[in-house]
Amino acid sequence: MKLNKLIACIVIILAYTQPIFSQFSTEEQLYIDSLNKIITTNSFHDTLKAQAYVSLSEVLATSNLDTVIFLCDKAQTLAEKKLSKTLHKLEEKSFKTSLAAALNNIGYVHMNKSNLNVALNYYFKSNDVELSNNNRQGLASGYNNIGLIYYDLGDIPLALEYYHKSLKIKEEFGDKKGIAMSFNNIGYVYKEQGDNKLAIDYYHKSLKIQQEIGNKKGMALAYNNIGSVYSSKKDYLKALSYYKQSLITRQEIGDKKGMAVCYQNLATVYKTQNNLDLSLIYYQKSLALRIEVEDKQGEAYSYLELGKLYLSLQKTTEAKSFAVKGLKIGTEGKFTDLIEKNAELLSKIAVQQGDWRQAFEMHNRALQIHDSVASKESIKAAANQQAKYIYEKEKTISDIEQAKKDDVVKQEKQKQWIIIIATAAVLILVLLFLLILFKRFNVIKRQNEIIQTQKGLIEVKHQEISDSIHYAERIQRTFLASNELLNEHLKDYFVLFKPKDVVSGDFYWASKLNNGLFAIVTGDSTGHGVPGAIMSLLNITSLEKAVEQETEASQIFNVARHIIINRLKKDGSSEGGKDGMDASICVYNFSKMQLIITAAQNPVWIVRGEEIIEIKPDKMPLGKHDKQDVSFTSQTIDLQKGDVIYTLTDGYPDQFGGIHEKKFMSKNLRKLLATNAHLPMNEQKELLTKTFHTWKAHLEQVDDVCIIGVRI
């Protein structure tokens, strides 16, 4: 009996597998043969047989999903039979591993056949076995599959719960590839729910890890997904940028199927922008690749999109050719969605061509696919009604258009009479006013001559002042930190510098100190415009003097303050000038990964991951003050890779705007910086600029603005 059962088993396996062996390479065929040998030879241990059933099911899954259930049932029966007995720990662990994999694979088949509740049941059974086997990595994979099922069932909270469970386990093991995929799955859920901000956040997290591990296939997927979010937001420039990055990455790894998807996405965006020539080129590129890699479903989809495009161009013959091909492949591959869409497209084309029979037949076929749960009679009735409507609508269209033309002619005649009468009335009024205006003309002419003379004088003076201010701006800029100096010492940074007027009281200055360290100062001089600019030059020259003799941050500020106070004693007032600046100085010791900070009135913020560290300033300026004899203090911060240091003046948070025209506030700026610190520095600068202009809207800029960001 045992021999007969074994022979029967072999025959069934061969019946499932033989017709598809020709699809495999020689190496794969040898592997399949070795698995079959383990299954059919009595000398092999049952642990190996159970593993062989599972492995063979996974090899054959791409060609015949039904084979998976048959083989995994064999593995399940064998493993459960053995586990009902007392086993050695290693044997027990091996059988549990095979059983969990078999249950998971059966769940996968049911998921692909849209038997979602059955699939969910198998995934839970698989996870129970993984839990008893203490296989945390297998458990993570199972949680991910369960999350996918719950998403398909529309239970978003449970989908996110299981995706996060999977993510937590992957983080425990440091499975970066798995973590990136979990971020991608979570991002997809948020995108489909319309939460674009969270979707982009998680997709960027996925992209960052894929870049770290050099997984170009994962990077291409992340670029594509980010592009899809921007496309849904109608930010087509960014969508195109990310789609193109995805395409380049897929070209590098030779992923032709992925390249076809990228071409499809680019074509769709260009079509949305009404750039039909480019759209056509990319649809054709996508189709060519899908034919090459024998992606039948994708090929049918490309035919559908090309048909739509040609129909929009009123090229019904070409549109019909593509739609027919799409319907044929969709029917052969049983791709119901594509059968419906290509049939509906053919119905629209038939209407354009006046082929009402074809329109009816194709629309009827689309309805049959679309409403598969309805009875055949209901579908037929609905199709007949719709086809009848289309026919009657198109049949009477010429009569309707003619009636509209007649109505337009009638209205035009009425308008002409109204225009003639109105014109005559206006001409009479114009003649009356011309008599009055002629008398005033000579008076106004003399007045204009005087005004033009005065205007010319004002314009000359205004130009002289404007030229002087712009020349002063060029001089002031030579005192600011140059791009060459910043690029020499900083790898990743941005400077947002927006004076209220042409010249500015705010400034940013940098210097290499005598001890070899690099210092950068963000300063806010008293006033803005021309007075502020002059004060900024005095402050910068005072700092330059201070660094000639000092290298400690606090001492540089102490010496600079002393110089400023002494210089302003000569301003002519009884008490001496009380002007100066609020500022912060950051001294970078990159070799020790340390930052020494002295802050006067203005804080320094450090964003580290999700945390923001605020370096509170000394409550005194660099200038005359009741604490002018108190030394400034320094704080030393141990830096970590990825830290982002922000220094700023008070111009940005003090800007009025928004719905209630209130100040932007420091807490909102701090939140904005912390939330977006993960972005590239140039994107952060763009975001800050855009947010500032949006907030300010029609209001005047109240002060100079300066923000510097440095990533370690």
Image (spheres, rainbow, N blue to C red):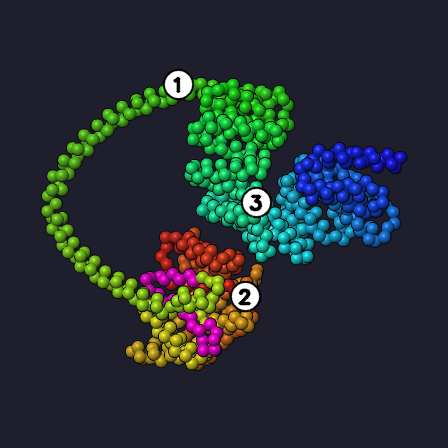
Count every numbered label the image shows and give the total: 3
Q: Determine whether, in the image, residue 146 is placed left or right of residue 555.
A: right
Secondary structure of residue under mark 1: helix
Quadrant (top left, top right, bottom left, bottom right) of the N terminus: top right
Give residue 564's position: percent from left, percent from top. 37, 77
Give residue 628's position: percent from left, percent from top. 42, 79
Residue 459 located within the stretch drawn in magenta: no
x 25%, y 62%: residue: 467
Q: Determine whether, in the image, residue 165 is placed left or right of residue 574.
A: right
Measured along the vertical axis of the image, is residue 268 above or below residue 448?
A: above
Q: Determine whether, in the image, residue 535 is placed left or right of residue 166.
A: left
Instruction: Quickly name the residue at label 3.
Output: 255
Instruction: Quickly name the residue at label 2.
Output: 613
Give residue 46's position: percent from left, percent from top. 83, 45
Q: In the current view of this chain or complex, which residue is farthest to the front?
A: 26
Secondary structure of residue under mark 2: strand
- Who is closer to the viewer here, 283 or 564? 283
Residue 639 sits in quarter: bottom right
Give residue 557's position: percent from left, percent from top. 44, 76
